[in-house]
Image (cartoon, rainbow, N blue to C red):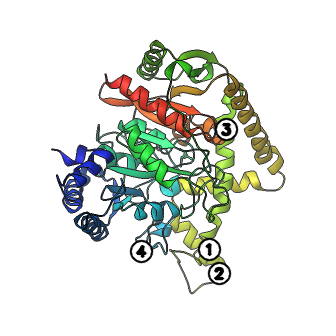
Amino acid sequence: MEINKLTISALHEGFLKKDFSALEVAKKYLEQIQAKDKDISAFLTITEDLALSQAKEVDKLISEKKEIPVLAGVPCAVKDNILVEGIKCTAGSKILENYTAPYDATVIKKLKREGAVILGKTNLDEFAMGSSTENSAFKITKNPCDLSRVPGGSSGGSAAAVAAEECCYALGSDTNGSIRAPASFCGIVGFKPTYGAVSRYGLIAFGSSLDQIGPLTKTVEDAKIIFDVISGKDELDSTSVKPKASNFKCQVSDIRIGIPKEYFIKGIDPDVEAAVKKAINLIEKEGAKVEEISLPHTKYALAVYYIIAPAEASANLARYDGIKYGLSKNKKDDLLDVYLESRGKGFGPEVKRRIILGTYSLSSGYYDAYYKKAQQVRGLIKKDFEEAFKKIDLIFSPVCPTPAFKIGEKIKDPFSMYLTDILTSAASLAGLPGISVPCGKSQNLPIGLHIFGNCFEDNKILETASFIERLISL
Ligand code: GLN
């Protein structure tokens, strides 16, 4: 039996049947990290002691014949912008290189309560800004399907760790595609819940009106298991909400699927388009109703995102001034020098670009022309979806216009990098939940199908994704 290939429920059953212990499973994964991560570079920190002690606790429960939750003993990895108490948390940035998390993020508290085994922290684009994980200040993560290519970003470390079987599942964060895009590039499942469905407490902030934590997994079933554990209202995050009770069961003949014509345009790789259309045909043959829809303000979504996200980032990143956290340079000189030196040496080029963009669009004189206008157009984008969801349940599209690109191909041209996010921007701005499910390949490179739906219809997406995952595997 290949332990590293097992899903969450298969591991759970194995523990109950005593096929293996939690300690054995944790060690298997740590060995896999040892063997593979030299090439993949998915991890920034490996928390071997923590993992082994957590696994031993689970084994103790099993030996005492106590009931164990489904996640108990299942090894996971955590994106390095989510706080795990006592463990370094860098957000992929020099400015937090020596920062140790003083508390657990709410999602981590919840996972720990379920007996999770935490193997380590994964690489990311600095402060989650990027689409390739090349913006990390520490290393470039490689795509396990082809080491000359990027794993996608910004949760590229988490996606690569799952795809390389270095962990059973991972947590990532998605501001505009950062869970779904790397999942699609690495051939795994990535689920971005509705904005507010999962607490952001303990997630290092990037764009606070967009950020959302979610799972990267081998299967849709695993994504649902994690979502059920980490979602829910949290007093420590005022934007989190209690989930709607859902007993949605996928009756395929009742599902109405919208195919937005704005998402199948010039620039989409022909293999990507063909794989997504094939998946749509499969579900249509099973009885789902498929119709073309129009989301007319889609064309503004990328531009709106790249005004709003940097604006929020510039406010959030003001706290890294060399006084409160991490890197503090030039302590002897005057205060302004401390700020300038710390921020100048601590932030990488993409983060500086975002801060400059953000402060510009928030400055008086430009606020109305850029930031306010962007918020107004965001409203129109949301309205497009509200109209669409009056007649359809879910929307299908590609996650990214192309499969994984080569390392170095786009890093010198920020605009072409930003274009990677073109198909996830509108849904992210509207706070919608969405999932990437593997739906085919272009040569060796995986392609992701994006299924997204109305706010708080997370379960409808997960049920349908699970149905289509089965269809595709047949
Ligand atoms: N690629 C997008 C950006 O660079 C989104 C990143 C994310 O979702 N965290 O802003």
- Distance from disc 4 to disc 2, alpha carbons, whole Å, reads 30 Å
- Distance from disc 2 to disc 1, alpha carbons, whole Å, reads 6 Å
Give the labeled residue for mark 2. 335
SS of the residue at dot 4?
A: loop
Q: Quadrant of the C terminus?
A: top left
- Distance from disc 1 to disc 3, alpha carbons, whole Å, reads 30 Å
Disc with the residue nearer the chain's start (3 vs 2) = 3
Report the front residue among 335 and 94: 94
Question: In the drawing, what numbered circle is on residue 284?
Answer: none
Q: Is residue 382 left or right of residue 44?
A: right
Q: Amino acid at mark 4?
A: Gly
Q: Is residue 274 left or right of residue 303?
A: left
Residue 229 lies, in percent from the top left, at: 47, 53
Q: Amino acid at mark 1?
A: Tyr
Disc with the residue nearer the chain's start (4 vs 2) = 4
Give the labeled residue for mark 1. 339
Q: In this view of the protein, can residue 423 be seen by the observer?
A: no
Question: In the drawing, what numbered circle is on residue 303?
Answer: 3
Residue lying at the far front in this picture: please name it: 65
Give the labeled residue for mark 4. 86
- Distance from disc 3 to disc 2, alpha carbons, whole Å, reads 36 Å
- Distance from disc 4 to disc 1, alpha carbons, whole Å, reads 27 Å
SS of the residue at dot 1?
A: helix
Q: Amino acid at mark 3?
A: Ala
Q: Amino acid at mark 2?
A: Leu
Looking at the image, do the residues carrying marks 3 and 2 touch, with CB atoms under 8 Å apart?
no
Classify residue 429 by image quadrant.
Answer: top right
